Amino acid sequence: MQKKTFRKAFAYMLLMLLFFFGKNIKAQDMLGVTLGNYSGVTSLMVNPAMIANTRYYLDINLVSADFFFKNNFAYIPGSDITIYKIIRDPNSIPTYEPRGLNFKYYDNKDLKFTTISSKIMGPSAMFQYGKHAFALSTSFQVFSNANRIPYEMPLLGYYEMDYPELYGVNFKDYDISQTAAAWMDLGLSYAYTLYEYMDQKITIGLTLKYIWSYSGFYVEANNIDYMVVNDSTMNIHNMNASVAFALPLDYNEPDQMMNDPFFKGHGFGADLGVVYVKKKSVDIERWNDLCEQQFDDYVFRIGASILDLGSITYKNNAQLHSYDDVSVYWQNFDTINYSNLNQLMSDLSMVFYNGDPNASYRADHFTLGLPTAVSVQADVNVYKDFYASGYWIHPLQFNLHAMRRAALVAVVPRYETKNLEFSLPVSLFEYKYPRVGLSARFWFVTIGTDRLGTWLGLANLDGMDFYASIKFGFGKGQCHSKFKGACNDEKYTRKSKKLRNKNNLF
């Protein structure tokens, strides 16, 4: 069985703080799919109350997928290669000195981060019946985030600890975290028009989700005070940290998968939302069938939501290790060899706890928080079929062992009709990194990106973003003769119906 030296593994792990799950690569927010009036069931991604405020009374999602990656350490210059070329020929990625790796790094002392997310919204559907709207949704996600990574750690990883400029420097770092998980969930959603009078309407919404997780992982360091003496010696003055994992691996035999049980953890999640609508008109027509419901076009619409409240608890093939107020002058750490994960954890325990291989072990279970966030959405009807949306989302990370969703603020102008929609998202990622995107919908197919520059080679390739959606919607107020049944009756489709006050819809 192949053994690994600890120095190389340690350097590799430092670098992987920015690239864990990197080969798996949620256009974080799918702005071209979730904010429009034809978003239907996909609007659940930003606000569960939105499903009662779309142009569809019935919407069926076949599949919507998004892929997102962004970091601020490593990059490939946009002038050297484009994503299109990488897709056509993966071997065309250039290498760079001095390490001969496939990327350069930003040479600054900023705290580093990475966000990697892949989400597929599977078969899902919503339908509205007057003041009530219901939805059933499925999704599959892989999510990883590293946050507040000190600049020297990925740099030491890049050079495999052989970087004399960092020797003898006393680093004092804190609140470092990395989380990763793969899971699927089933969601039930309900939205209700709580208040409707004259030209105003308020809708509330709730989504409850049950979660099955294939794997989960976190590393957190509340503080670490240390010095790198040379490429084989570290002086850790004080450290408070923990690591937890529930992986589909045999921890004694690294080449063996552990898929019994298949899911290592289970959990619950919830989304809450409210939407206020200032409508263009006061009265609406009576309706007798679902297809006759009318869409309330608006002057403006404002929504607020809390997303992904909840957590996942891992009890299968799970381990939790903790290093509490430890210190060590660690010589020759590069001579430690290991061949499996249990051996590595035992060796680390022996180093930090005076030769005790089990002292770091705390439990056979742990909890990982979902990427909770608060969001505000605003939409204005500029002129006829032209709209402009404002979007803001901010993470709510209650502790270091909770996944952290990235912050985003965006303005999204769009043109939308039943069969055609274009949007141009302009956003600021983590309040610092500007992006321009483009999205297009042709009837039931949508494709888009929130980072157009990386596809065109106009920006450094330090991330990627792409999303697509295939779904079918049945519009309000559209009772087509090709559909048999009550809606085919002329008495239900004529527009000259008696009006009544909106507050007495039923």
Image (spheres, helix red, strand yellow):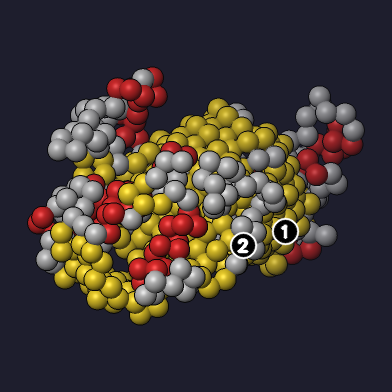
User: Which label belongs to residue 314?
Assistant: 2
Tell me the kind of residue under disc 2.
Answer: Tyr
| Side of 20 relative to 64 (left or right) | left
Q: Which of 144/65 is in front?
A: 144
Kind of element beneath mark 2 = strand
Quick check: 93 above or below 226? Answer: above
Q: Is residue 468 visible?
A: yes
Q: Which residue occupies the extreme bottom position in the image?
A: 325
Which mark sits nearer the N-terminus, 2 or 1? 1
Q: Which of 350/215 is in front?
A: 350
The residue that appears at 61% across and 57% down in the rendered structure is 317
Q: Which of 233/112 is in front?
A: 233
The residue that appears at 73% across and 49% down in the rendered structure is 136
Mark 2 vs mark 1: in front:
2
Within 10 Å of the Cα at label 1, are there few (<14), some (14-19), or many (20+) other Cα atoms? many
User: Which label belongs to residue 190?
Assistant: 1
Rendering coords of residue 53 (x, y %):
64, 52
Kind of element beneath mark 1 = strand
User: Which label belongs to residue 156?
Assistant: none
Q: Is residue 427 visible?
A: no
Tell me the kind of residue under disc 1.
Answer: Tyr
Rendering coords of residue 378 (x, y %):
48, 57
